[in-house]
RNA sequence: CGGGGAGUGGCGCAGUUUGGUAGCGCGCAUGGUUUGGGACCAUGAGGCCGCAGGUUCAAAUCCUGUCUCCCCGACCA
């Protein structure tokens, strides 16, 4: 491509709307252009990268048995009513009626249409397992778009779906998909962590996220740098016992006893006042579910915090929220002194950090009073016990006991073992070997194309611009000519033609611009290999060749150029694509 | 949806407090001089100041409403 004819322009200054580095670079380099909040056009350079990313995805999906299909963006409401999500999903799904008044929606993901395909075409266990995928536009009316392509409303996603005869077969297949995900990210130059994640609105039994760790990410993950344990904060577990075993078991034989604790309405103040470790206290919180049920009492050891995601999952609701002070009062609960002892009629969820083996300090549900010698199971019921604790920086790894650390990241992809959530509700059955009809066992695997592009740039850049991995660079080579001397122009024109013949992708800066402008644009646009033709280079014996990622350049003689450049391109590819 | 900020030419911004009919840098066009790290000179094009009402002799500027965009939170496969 000759830059003199290229559609789009670079910008010297970063547009004010850009917050993240990758967002600013994409706008400055002219890769994308915003049409509305969270809705972007791709310009020629950006689109070339997108197509390369998609091809990397295709190659890996095909390699694990995926067959590419394409499903519609506009869906009839009917199939979403069958799965139930028509009613579960809120305003983030765009709905409308067609001219004859039928309910329609924009697909935000494609479980429903793919399950419809499966029930039409899969009849027998002989057809299983079976994997299809597509790369398609999705629309989610996000409450808030942000970070350029990181969180948008219209986006393209690679979505794969696998169908199995049973859970065991899904579990056999699942790791292949995870490995494919890791290869895709590696090929694109983005390091990712595979972390355990919440199944969220997708349902199912097990899920992972593939996260690019960066401070500008919006997800929080908990990980162990010693053994590699990693999980989204929403589901992260930790060892609650190690190193924190209460030294004193209190007086388990004594009755729960009311003590005066004036103004001590926090765990820290009351345990200090009574001279007890927070480990031997019980923190009581009150929540309401999204459906308005409550208050539900959530109990946890005084030194820990509640993880609201875990609590919501345990209660089978989408979301919980803390009760408001006036709600507590209306139910006769005393903030700061709340207690499960002596209060009737509340659902009580107890974190498994609380043990019937110890006696604790707990609220007395009366202002300025606490109870001591409270024994779980004796003084209040231990009926609903679960892990509802929030893992924090410094807590101990559930696997190896090393301290956990917390990091931020961007979710590039996710994998779910869906099970029969959709096949059951939509009647996607197959006949098994024994002649019985069974619901298909499904997995689904998503990966955001634009989001991966944002991560590629976030990871591969310096203060001058993008440093593309050659695998996804819009062009392999950035050729530029300096000056208007006829020898320079003729040489550059010839190199442009010569390189393209064997399939090298060349962006040719043939504009009548000063050297500074051309070099700075080359750095900003970030093609992996830069070739400069100038009077100076010709006098030095050829053309100057420089890697975007390197400091130094070399002069290559014209008769060695073809070999040299193709060798360089091969070496660049081998950095990202392991030999195979 | 709650809190904060902002809408003035393609991009970055000034002007708004103290109303008087729009300006700077970059970019763009034409001509000339330049040519290895964002050159220089000259001459130009391009804006009903987000939109709608109102106040006023007069509104980018004051008042009311509304839309859009950005950030934090909520939300999120």
Image: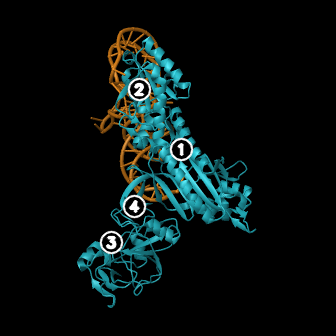
Chain colours: A cyan, B orange
Chain ID at mark 3:
A
Circle 1: element type: loop
Of the numbered discs 3 and 2, the one sitting upstream in the chain is 3
Q: How far apart are marks 3 and 2 (CA)?
A: 60 Å
Of the numbered discs 4 and 3, the one sitting upstream in the chain is 4
Circle 4: element type: loop
Instruction: Kindly check if marks 4 and 3 are in contact, taking CB atoms under 8 A apart as contact.
Output: no
Circle 3: element type: loop
Relative height, residue A251 to residue A310 (above, below): below
Characterize the local packing of mark 2: few (<14), some (14-19) or many (20 or more) Cα atoms within 10 angstroms: many
Chain ID at mark 1:
A
Of the numbered discs 2 and 4, the one sitting upstream in the chain is 4
Q: Which residue is located at x 58 percent, y 44 percent?
A: A59
Q: Distance between the residues labelled 4 and 3?
A: 25 Å
Task: Give the labeled residue for mark 2.
Answer: A545
**Which one is in front in this view, the residue at disc 4 or the one at disc 3?**
4
Instruction: Kindly check if marks 2 and 4 are in contact, taking CB atoms under 8 A apart as contact.
Output: no
- Quarter of the image where one finds residue A175: bottom right
Judging depth in this view, the residue of B8 and A442 nearest the camera is A442
Horizontal arrangement in the rendering, residue A113 relative to residue A150 (left or right): right
Q: Distance between the residues labelled 2 and 4?
A: 43 Å
Instruction: Kindly check if marks 1 and 2 are in contact, taking CB atoms under 8 A apart as contact.
Output: no
Judging depth in this view, the residue of A121 and A148 nearest the camera is A121
Numbered tag placed on residue A303 in the rendering: 3
Judging depth in this view, the residue of A535 and A21 nearest the camera is A535
Task: Give the labeled residue for mark 4.
Answer: A227
Relative height, residue A571 to residue A286 (above, below): above
Q: Position of residue A435 (x, y in %)?
A: 76, 68
Q: Where is residue B30 in the image (x, y as percent from the top left)?
A: 46, 12
Q: How far apart are marks 1 and 2 (CA)?
A: 28 Å
- Quarter of the image where one finds residue B49: top left
Task: Give the labeled residue for mark 1.
Answer: A580
């Amino acid at each position: 491509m000759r830059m003199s004819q290229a559609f789009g322009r670079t910008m010297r200054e970063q547009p004010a709307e850009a917050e993240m580095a990758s967002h600013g670079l994409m706008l400055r380099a002219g890769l994308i252009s915003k049409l509305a909040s969270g809705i972007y056009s791709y310009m020629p350079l950006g689109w070339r990268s997108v197509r390369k990313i998609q091809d990397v995805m295709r190659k890996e999906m095909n390699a694990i048995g995926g067959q590419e299909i394409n499903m519609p963006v506009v869906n009839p409401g009917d199939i979403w009513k069958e799965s139930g999500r028509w009613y579960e999903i809120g305003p983030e799904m765009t709905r409308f009626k067609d001219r004859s008044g039928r309910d329609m929606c924009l697909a935000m993901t494609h479980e429903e249409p793919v399950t419809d395909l499966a029930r039409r075409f899969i009849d027998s266990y002989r057809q299983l397992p079976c994997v299809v995928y597509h790369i398609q536009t999705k629309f989610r009316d996000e409450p808030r778009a942000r970070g350029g392509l990181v969180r948008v409303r219209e986006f393209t996603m690679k979505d794969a779906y696998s169908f199995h005869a049973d859970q065991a077969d899904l579990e056999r297949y699942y790791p292949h998909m995870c490995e494919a995900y890791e290869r895709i990210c590696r090929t694109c130059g983005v390091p990712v962590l595979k972390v355990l994640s919440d199944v969220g609105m997708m349902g199912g039994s097990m899920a992972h996220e593939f996260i690019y760790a960066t401070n500008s990410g919006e997800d929080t993950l908990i990980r162990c740098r010693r053994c590699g344990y990693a999980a989204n904060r929403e589901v992260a577990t930790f060892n609650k016992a190690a190193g924190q075993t209460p030294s004193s078991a209190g007086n388990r034989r004594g009755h729960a006893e009311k003590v005066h604790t004036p103004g001590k309405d926090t765990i820290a103040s009351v345990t200090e006042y009574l001279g007890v470790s927070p480990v031997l206290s019980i923190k009581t919180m009150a929540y309401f579910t999204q459906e308005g049920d409550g208050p539900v009492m959530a109990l946890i050891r005084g030194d820990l915090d509640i993880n609201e995601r875990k609590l919501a999952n345990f209660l089978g609701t989408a979301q919980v929220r803390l009760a408001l002070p006036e709600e507590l009062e209306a139910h006769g609960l005393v903030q700061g002194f709340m207690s499960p002892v002596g209060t009737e009629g509340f659902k009580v969820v107890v974190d498994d950090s609380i043990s019937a083996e110890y006696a604790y300090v707990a609220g007395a549900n009366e202002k300025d009073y606490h109870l001591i010698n409270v024994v779980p199971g004796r003084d209040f019921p231990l009926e609903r016990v679960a892990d509802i604790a929030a893992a924090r920086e410094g807590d101990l790894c559930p696997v190896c006991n090393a301290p956990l650390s917390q990091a931020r990241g961007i979710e590039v992809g996710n994998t779910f073992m869906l099970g029969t959530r959709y096949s059951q509700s939509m009647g996607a059955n197959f006949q098994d070997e024994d002649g019985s009809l069974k619901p298909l066992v499904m997995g689904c695997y998503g990966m955001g194309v634009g989001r991966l592009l944002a991560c590629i740039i976030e990871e591969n850049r310096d203060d001058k611009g993008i440093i593309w991995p050659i695998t996804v660079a819009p062009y392999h080579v950035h050729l530029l000519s300096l000056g208007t001397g006829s020898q320079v122009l003729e040489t550059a024109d010839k190199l442009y033609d010569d390189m393209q013949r064997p399939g090298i992708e060349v962006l040719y800066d043939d504009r009548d611009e000063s050297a500074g402008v051309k070099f700075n644009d080359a750095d900003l646009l970030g093609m992996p290999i830069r070739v400069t033709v100038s009077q100076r280079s010709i006098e030095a014996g050829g053309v100057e060749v420089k890697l975007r990622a390197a400091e130094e350049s070399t002069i290559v003689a014209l008769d060695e150029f073809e070999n040299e450049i193709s060798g360089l391109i091969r070496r660049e590819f081998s950095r990202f694509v392991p030999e195979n």
